[in-house]
Amino acid sequence: MISLTNIKILIEKELKHYINTPPSYVLASVFLLLCGYFFSQPLFLINQSNLNSITDIAPLILTFFAPALSMKLIAEERKTQTIEIIMTLPFSEEEIIISKYISASLIMLSTISLMFIYAITLYSLSSPDSGHIIGSYLAIFLCSLSFLSIGIFSSTLSSSQINAFIIGFAISFFFYLAGKITFFVPTNLQSLVNYIGVDSHISNISRGVVDLKDLIYFLSIIFIFNYLSIYKLKLMRFG
Amino acid sequence: MIKANEIIKNYGSFKALKGISFQALNNKITALLGPNGAGKTTTLRVLSGYLTPDSGIIEYFGNASLDLKELKKIIGYVPENNPVYEDIYVSDYLEWIAKLYSLGEKDIKSAIEKCALYDVIDKKIGSLSKGYKQRVSLAKAIIFKPKILLLDEPTTGLDPNQANETRELIKELKEDRVVIISTHILSEAENLCDEIIIINKGEIAISGAKDDIVKKYSKNSYTLKFEGNIESNIFNFENLSNISSRTENGETLFNIEFSDETDMRKEILRFAKEKNISLIEFYRNRITLEEIFAKITRHNGGL
C-alpha cells in the first residue's frame, strides 16, 4: 500500500536536494531566459499581446528542460549506489517514483510560475483574453509534467545522467515532432499522428478550451511513463 | 534468526549464488568470508531485500512470507563501498531517517552518541572522512534498533584506528539482534565474529561456529625449541604422527604432530625433564582462520 507519509518524507528530501544543488538554478534561469526572449520578441516587435509565441516554443524548450531536470532522479542514485540505500529503506517502488516525480514537478511548476510575469505584463499593457492566458499556462504545465514523466522514466534506464538526458530528450522530441509532421504522413494516419503529438492538444487548451480528450492525453502520458518507471525499478530487484 | 534455504541468484548467465543454505543466529556476529566475486555482496543484497532471489526461501525469525516493506523495517543495512547522500547535512539525514521510522529526538541523540558523530553533525556528509561517512551509515542503520544488521565490508578503506573503533561498535551492537558482516579481512572475522560462513564461487564452502571450525581444521601439533643439537628420534610418544625439525644458531626447532586429540603439553614437559634437555620455547599450534580460508578456497579453485 502506498503511504502518503512516506511520500511526504521522500519529497522533503528530494526538494532539499534540488535546493542545495546549483545546477537546478542554472537550468531554471536558462529556461526562463529563453522563454522571456520568445515572449518579448513579438510583444515589442509586432505588438502582439498574447502568449502564442510561448505556447509555440515552450514545448520545444521543455524537450530539453524537463529531461535535464529529471535525468538525475534515478540515474544519479544508481551511479552513486545510493539506490541501494533508498531501496532498502521501507519505501515501495511506487512511493520512490511518485515522490521523485512530485518533487521534480514542484520545481518545474515553481519555475513556470515565474512566467506569470508575462501575464501581468500583458494585463498592464492591454486586455488579453483571460481564457487564453489561463489555458496557455495550463497547457505549458501539462506539457512540462508529461515530459517530466518521460524524463524520470529515461532516468531509470541508465546510470549515466547524460544517457538519461538523451533518451528523455529523444522521447519528448518524438511527441513534439509528431504534431509538426502531420502533413507528411498518409491521410489515414494523420489523425492518429496528430493525436500523438503535443501540438494539437496544447493549441486546443491554450485557446481556453479545456477538452477532456486533451486532458486525458496528457494524463495518459504522465500515468504511462510513471508506471513504466515503477516497473523498471521493480525489475532492478531481479538484478 | 535468519535461515536461508537453497538460495539461487543468477545475473544473466552468471551464477552468483548456486543454492546456498545457512543460518545466522541472534546475539551472534556472523562473518561472510570469501574471495572477491564469491557471492558475499549478492548474499547480503538478497538478505536485505534489495535483490529478489531466483529461488529459495529465507526465514526471518521463523517467518518466510514477510512483506518486503515489513522486512525492510527490521533490517539495518550498510551496502558495499558505503554509498552516502553527499549533499545532505548529517543532522538532516538522521532526522529524515528518524521521521521515516517515526522516531524521536532521543533516538537520534542515541545514534549520534553511539557512533560518535557530535563533531560532524552540522557538516555535509560529502565533506566527511571515510571513517565518519562509515559512522553516519552505521548511525542510519542502527537508529531504529533493527533486529537484523547487515554490514557489507564495514571497515574497508578505514585507517587502523577507525577500523578498530568500528569493530568495537559492531561488537556492542550484537546484543538482541542478528549481525552479519561480509569481510575479506580474516583477522577481523577472527577477532569479531562468533559464526563463520565461507563462501566460494557462489557456494558455501563451510559454515558454523568459529571455534568449531577452527577445532575441525586444527591438528594436535606443538612447536618446541631446544638448546643444542637434538636428534628427532629421541621422541618416543606412541601417538606421534609427524615430526619435522631444523637447527638454527645452536637451537633445534621441532614441529611435532599427534594422531589423537589428547592434550600433550604436560607429557612434553615431563619428557624434556626426563631426557634432561633444555626446552627454551614451547607452544601448542593453533590454526588461523587465514590458513583455513586459504585451504578451503584454494582447494576449491578459488583466489
Image (cartoon, coloured by chain):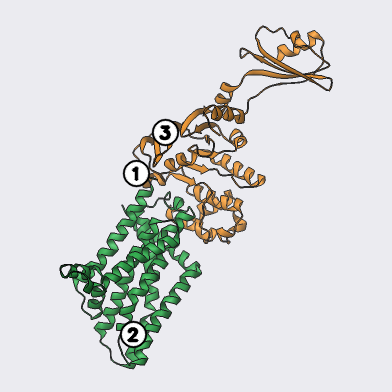
Chain colours: A green, B orange
C-alpha span from label 3 to label 2: 65 Å
Which numbered disc covers residue B183? none
Position in image of residue B75 (x %, y %): 45, 44
| Horizontal side, residue A178 vs residue B188: left or right | left
- The residue that appears at 49% across and 55% down in the rendered structure is A80
Position in image of residue A127 (x %, y %): 28, 91
Q: Could you tell which of marks 3 and 1 lies nearer the N-terminus?
A: 3
**Which three-letter amino acid code belongs to the residue tagged 3?**
Lys
Q: What crowding class fits label 3: few (fewer than 14 Cα within 10 Å), some (14-19), or many (20 or more)? A: some
- Rendered image quadrant of residue A175: bottom left
Which residue is identified by label 2?
A119
Q: Chain of mark 3?
A: B
Which residue is identified by label 1?
B67
The relative height of residue A111 versus residue A49 in the rendered view (above or below) is above
C-alpha span from label 3 to label 1: 24 Å
Q: What crowding class fits label 1: few (fewer than 14 Cα within 10 Å), some (14-19), or many (20 or more)? A: few
Callout 2: SS = helix
Q: Nearer the viewer, residue A33 or A24?
A: A33
Which residue is identified by label 3?
B18
Residue that sits furthest to the left in the current view: A188
**Which three-letter amino acid code belongs to the residue tagged 1?**
Asp
C-alpha span from label 2 to label 1: 51 Å
The relative height of residue B296 versus residue A220 in the rendered view (above or below) is above
- Rendered image quadrant of residue B273: top right
The relative height of residue A2 versus residue B284 in the rendered view (above or below) is below
The reply to whether callout 3 and callout 2 are in contact (CB within 8 Å) is no
Q: Is residue B98 visible?
A: no
Callout 3: SS = strand
- The residue that appears at 37% across and 64% down in the rendered structure is A168
| Horizontal side, residue A158 vs residue B270: left or right | left
